[in-house]
Amino acid sequence: MSSNDGLQVPSTVLDISPIMQGNEADKAADYANYFCSYAYLYHQKQMLMDHVRMRAYHNSIMLNKHLFEGKVVLDVGTGSGILSIWCAQAGAAKVYAVEYTDMAKHAKALVDHNGLSDVIEVIQSSVEDLVLDQKVDIII
C-alpha cells in the first residue's frame, strides 16, 4: 500500500490504468492526446455551458468563502481560468492558475480583463514541472 497523509491506496490501483504506461514514445503520445483537446476553445466552451457542473463549482466556492479568504490556492488545469477567478472573488490572497496548454494565454486574458492579475498568476506549465515560491492552502 502507498500512503499519502493517511490515505491508504493499494499499489495495484496505481498501476491498472493503461494511460501513461509503456515506453517513452507511448507515454508521450498519451500525454499529447490528453492535453490536445483541452487546448481548444470549443472544449472549454462545452464545459462552461454545462450549467449543472458550473453551478456546483460556483456554489462550492462562493458558499464557502470563509475557506478561501486570505488563502493561497493552486488551480491545477485551470483551462479558461473561471475557477481561479471565482477563488479570487471569494477572497483568496493568491491564486496560481496552472495550465499546460496554450489555453493559458486565454486564461491570462480573462484574468486581466476582470482586473484580477494582482491576485491570480497564470502559469503555463505542467504541474509536474511547477515550482512555487510558497506553500498552498487549497488545491482545486
Image (cartoon, rainbow, N blue to C red):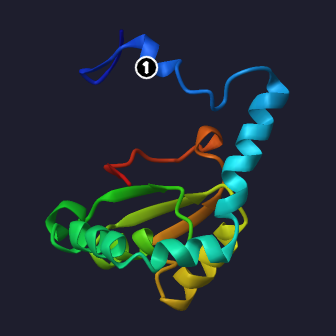
Residue 23 in sight here: yes
Q: Is residue 47 above or below residue 16?
A: below
| Vertical placement of residue 29 versus 20, above or below | below
Task: Say whether residue 81 is visible.
Answer: no
Q: Quadrant of the N terminus?
A: top left
The residue drawn where x is 56% and y is 57% is: 98
Whole-percent x, y for residue 77 in the image: 54, 56
Residue 99, quarter of the rendered image: bottom right
Looking at the image, residue 66 sits to the left or right of residue 112; the answer is left
Residue that carries the numbered disc 1 in the rendered image: 13
Locate residue 132 relative to residue 66 in the image: left or right: right
Q: Which of the pair 46/114 is nearer the observer?
A: 46
- State the residue in front, 4 or 93: 4
For the C terminus, give its image quadrant. bottom left
**Residue 84, image x, y percentages:** 43, 69
Q: Secondary structure at mark 1?
A: helix
Furthest residue toward top: 1
Q: Is residue 93 above or below residue 108?
A: above
Taking 117 as reference, is 3 above or below it?
above
Q: Quadrant of residue 51?
A: bottom left
Identify the image quadrant of residue 65.
bottom left
Question: Going by the image, does 88 lie left or right of 30?
Answer: left
Q: Position of residue 63 (x, y in %)?
A: 15, 72
Q: Residue shown at 61%/76% (left/top)?
A: 108
Give the percent coordinates (x, y) of residue 31: 71, 42
Residue 117 located left or right of residue 109: left
Q: Residue at x 24, y 21 (%)?
A: 6
Q: Residue at left 64%, top 62%?
A: 38
The amino acid sitting under disc 1 is Val
Assess disc 1: are there few (<14), some (14-19) or many (≥20) residues with their C-alpha within 10 Å of its C-alpha. few
